[in-house]
Structures are given as C-alpha cells and as structure tokens.
Amino acid sequence: MKVRAGLFLGLLLASAATAFAAPAKAPVYDERPAKLEHPVSLRDYERRSVDIPMRDGVKLHTVIMVPKGAKGVGMLLTRTPYNAEEMTSQHGSSSMASAIDGYDSAPDVVMAAGYIRVVQDVRGKYGSEGAYVMNRPFVGTSLNPTKTDHATDTYDTIDWLVKNVPESNGRVGIIGISYDGFTALAALVNPHPALKVAVPMNPMVDGWRGDDWFHNGAFRQIGLSYMWEQVGTRDNASKYEVTEADAYTHYMKYGSAGALATAHGLDQIGFWQKIKQHQAWDSFWQEQAMDKVLAKAPLKVPTMLVHSLWDQEDIYGAPAVWKALRPSDKEGMLYLSMGPWYHGQAIDPGDRLGAIRWDADTSKWWRREVLAPFLAHYLADKPMDLARVTAFQSGSNQWQRLGQWPTAPAAKKLFLLPGEGLGFEPAAEAGTVDYVSDPAKPVTYYPRPNKQEGYDGNPWPTWLVGDQRPVSGRPDVLSFTGPVLEKAMTIAGAPVVHLTASTSGTDSDWVVKLIDVYPDEVPGDRAMGGYQLAVGMDIFRGRFRETLAEARPLKAGAPLEYTFELPQANHVFLPGHRIMVQVQSSWFPLYDRNPQTFVPSILDAKPGDYVKAVQKVSVGGDSGSYIALPVVE
C-alpha cells in the first residue's frame, strides 16, 4: 500500500508540475530589427546624434554632421524648435548637401567651406528634454524664474562642442531664420569665447511692435494655429483642425479671435493665455524684446543681421536690432544685409518675388558674395571685403554697398490731398476725405478665396507684393494717387505715417500703404501694366495712440493724430510710375477685426460690440495728413 501510495503521489505531483509549467515561448514574429542601422558607408559625412547636458542636467538633442576628411574646420550651429533630426535628413539622401537642403541651411555655402553642421532641438521640443516656453525670456527678468535660458543653453552647447568634436578648429558660428534667428540673437547675450560669428536671419525680436503676434497692437490671428501646434505637444503631433478652405470664412465664423481660440481648444495653451493678458506693449513684451535686451551690453561677436524687405512674418526685427546696436558698435562688429525677399528667401531661389522679377538670382548672389566670405573670415581667417550695409534697391534692381542705414532721414512730406490726390505741397484749405468702415465686410489682406495653409494657392509667402488693385476700388479704401513721375525718386529708410483722422466710434484700426503704381502698359512685361506694388504698409490700433503700454478709448468725432513707421524700404519710383497711398480700417483675416467700440479686450469682443463707423481723414490746412519719406536727394 505504501509503495502504491507513493507512486500515486509522485504521479500527482508530476501532473501538477506539468499543469503549472510556464507556457512555451511564442515564436518571434517581428520583421523590425531591435535597432535600425543606416548603411553609413554610403554617406559623404559622419552623423552623430548626441544628447548634450546643460548646467541644470537637462539634455538637449543635437545632430552633428562632419564631412568626411574634415580636419580643423569651423562649426556652424543652429538651435531650433523645428526638429533637428528632420532638418538634417532632407530628401532621403546620403549626400550631406542634400540632407541639409532645407530650412535654415545654405548647403552651397556650408559644403564649399567644409563646415561641420550642428543642429539642436531647443528645450522641450522634439528630442530635447525640459519644458518649452515660447521665446523663453532671459534669466534675471521677472518672466523667467529658472536659471536657464537660450543664452545659457547656447553657452553650454558650445562648451561641449569645442571639447568633443575633434575635427573642429574650436570656432563656432551660429545661424538661423525666424525663431532660429531669435536663438542666434540670444547667443549674443554673455557669449561663449568660442562663438566667433553670428548670422540672425529674419529674427523674431519684438512680438508686439511688429513681428509674429501683433503689429502696433493689432493681433495677427492667423498665428493661433502656430501656437496650438508649437506649444501643445513636444513634436507638433496635434494639428490645428479647420474645415474651411477659405481663411476668411474660418475667421468670420467665430466673430472674435478669442471665441475662435476657445472653440479650437487654445484656452489650454499657456502662451495664448499670456497673449490675452498682455494685449498692450507692457513689461511682458518690453522685457523680452531682443533689441532692448542686446542694447544693454556692447556687442562682443561679429554679427550680420539679415532682413527681408517684404518679410511677411518678422519685418520689424532685424532693423530694430540694427537701430539699437549701431550707435554703440565702436568695434565695427555689426553688419546688415537687406534683400528683396519674403521670410527666409535668402536660402531659396531669389530671381523673383511673386509677380516681381529682379533680373537675377538675388539670393544666390548674396550667399556667394556676402554670407560665404563673412563666415569664412571669422571661422577660417579668410580675407573679407564687405560693406557695413549690403542692400538691394528695388526699382533699379541692383545691390548697393552702403556705409550706413538709413541713408536719408524721413523728412520729405508727401501730403494727402482733397479728391484723393497726393503731392509734395499741402492743400491750403482744410477738409476731410471720408469712408464708412463696416466690420461685417472687412477689407481683405489678399483677395478671396484666402487659401489656408496646406491648400494649393496659399498666398502667404508673397502676399506683401500682391497687387493692391483688388481693394483700391472699394468704397471703404481711400486711394490717394499722385501724378505721373517725370523723374525717378529714391527712398532709403522707414517712411513715417502722420495720419490725422476721426472716427464716429470709440476705437479704430488704421492701415496705411505706400504703393508704386506701374504705367498702364509695361512693354516686355505686359502682365505688370497698372500693377500696384506695396513698397511698405502696416497697421496701427487706435487705442494705443497716446501710449503703447495702455489701451485708451478714442474721442468719437475728434480729429486725432496717429504717428507710426512703415517697414524699411530701399526703392526707386521710376519715371512714368505714380505714387499711391491707401488708407483703410481693416486687414482681414490676417488681423482680427476692431469692433470700433472700445472694449477692454478686443480678443473677447461680443457680436453687439461690432459697429459701423464713419472715418474722416484730414487733408490740407495745418493738420493735414502726410507721410514723411526718406528721400535720397
């Protein structure tokens, strides 16, 4: 019995062991390798993806591209929120020139000089750790409670690079467009000794005065989609969704910009909340304005500011920095380039801008004759013969070597005259030219349909040179037109608007455009007959007439003066052309509509706040409106 019982127990235990044994391992059924390795032998460069530690322990993802055989060459750095891996992997090519042939890189310049190319994700974006803050303010301001900013991160990055990239000569240059132009400017604050040269191109400088978010207080509501995608996620994975192909329809649908933002989830976005809280040019904007930040200390790094004369995004920035730094530049480190380009076109083909032809590839010429020698001088000790200012003059379509900018003061008065005339002598009798501004039927910045981004025909890059004839015949657009010019007239600087006007409302926007009207027929380029080319135009929100720092209502019916600058212009009005000045009170959907009733927050205006207003522009007499032109005699 004991033997049988033992046998039975053994069989029972064996059966239990079998029942509770680990299941058989499932067969591997995956075609993806544990780690994908590129066949690097096909590349003409070595690619290194590294995470560089900052002083607070946060690591920033960085791509380093070293041309094969490189030894003792300079490094060219870009710091970006736009995906370093993607920016250095263009076109699916193993060629370094093709891999960097995209945003922020000038591959012809980089490859000809053999530079090591470095692109880094800023804090909180794509492969980098940390928190993302739009245009992160600097340490020491009331806006940044931490001990890090773009200046400290650039310093720490350069310090790591010069110690860990043996193929370099220990010299670093920084270059970037737009946001990346802003980070290039930030590098100039307490710069690392190894930073030898900087090229900020079309940089974001002051988001309220005239760059991305506001222009003179008027909100650029098309930036809402950028805020959503840029701030909402680390990798821009969540897209701003629209169902209307026509941007006009999209923005009119919701009434105010605030109502639109709420409907599209923007109230979750911290930067949007800051926009709502700071609709005037208060300390929030002034403390982080780069022209003000950089003016606090002498420039220590040779810097070339690059400006596009028709920059649809950051037309204020580079000239503002030039103006702030030029008087104190005793060492001769500051340079300025101005080309006939849209935002960032200096690295794109530059033979034309929209319908306007320049007779040559202006971008290629500038990269070869200006950018390349400037970088080579400071990164490789090559000789350089550059003027302090290199500027393209439209109209004559030629590059100029200048010793200063502007080359003329805004002193020549161009008067608005009765009957929508224009001349250099004022009318003796005072009067007004009137129109009715209706927020329900706003003037468009570009003819409808105004295609949204992603649709064929999106006008955004070239709209600033778009023909102004589609609006010049509207009853709510005044078109003051001068006589046919008998001789050329050249301007070189920022025209200054001196508009005296009244409104029947208690708030108003004023849009002023300086326009070159082509002859009715242009032999050799017949499509340009009668073309109305805006040389400079901008908007001013009336509530900031007394002070930019505080919104105040306008006195209804009272003629009030509004003074503001138009963007920089370097232009020749040719014989046979005419000069025109247009005045209007909306510029939609680029800018949100002014309700023309004073409310504390235009972003939160209610439907009942939007009213028609009678606008009266003063002409003639002692208080007649005029534009002060920087005419080169």
Image (cartoon, rainbow, N blue to C red):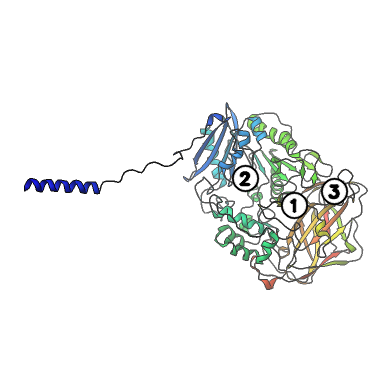
Depth check, front residue: 557 or 477 = 477
Residue nearest the observer in this picture, 91 or 328: 91
Residue identified by numbered label 2: 180
For discs 1 and 2, the disc positioned in front in the rendered view: 1
Q: Which residue lies furthest to the right in this view?
A: 486
Res 528 label = 3
Q: Position of residue 182 (x, y in %)?
A: 63, 47
Give the amino acid type for the residue marked by disc 1 in the picture: Trp
The residues bearing labels 1 and 2 have C-alpha atoms spaced at a distance of 23 Å
What is the three-letter code of the residue carrying label 2?
A: Asp
Q: Residues within 10 Å of mark 2 (few under 14, many from 20)?
A: many
The residue at the far bottom in this view is 608
- Specify few, some or many for label 1: CA neighbours under 10 Å numbering under 14, 14-19, or 20 or more: many
Image position, residue 193 (x, y; %): 58, 36
Q: Name the quadrant containing residue 625.
A: bottom right
Q: Would you say the residues marked 2 and 3 are in contact, meaning their CB atoms lie under 8 Å apart?
A: no
The residue lying at 79 percent from left, 58 percent from top is 512
Mark 2, secondary structure of its residue? helix
**Residue annotated with mark 1:** 463
Q: In percent of the image, x 76 and y 39: which residue is there?
A: 362
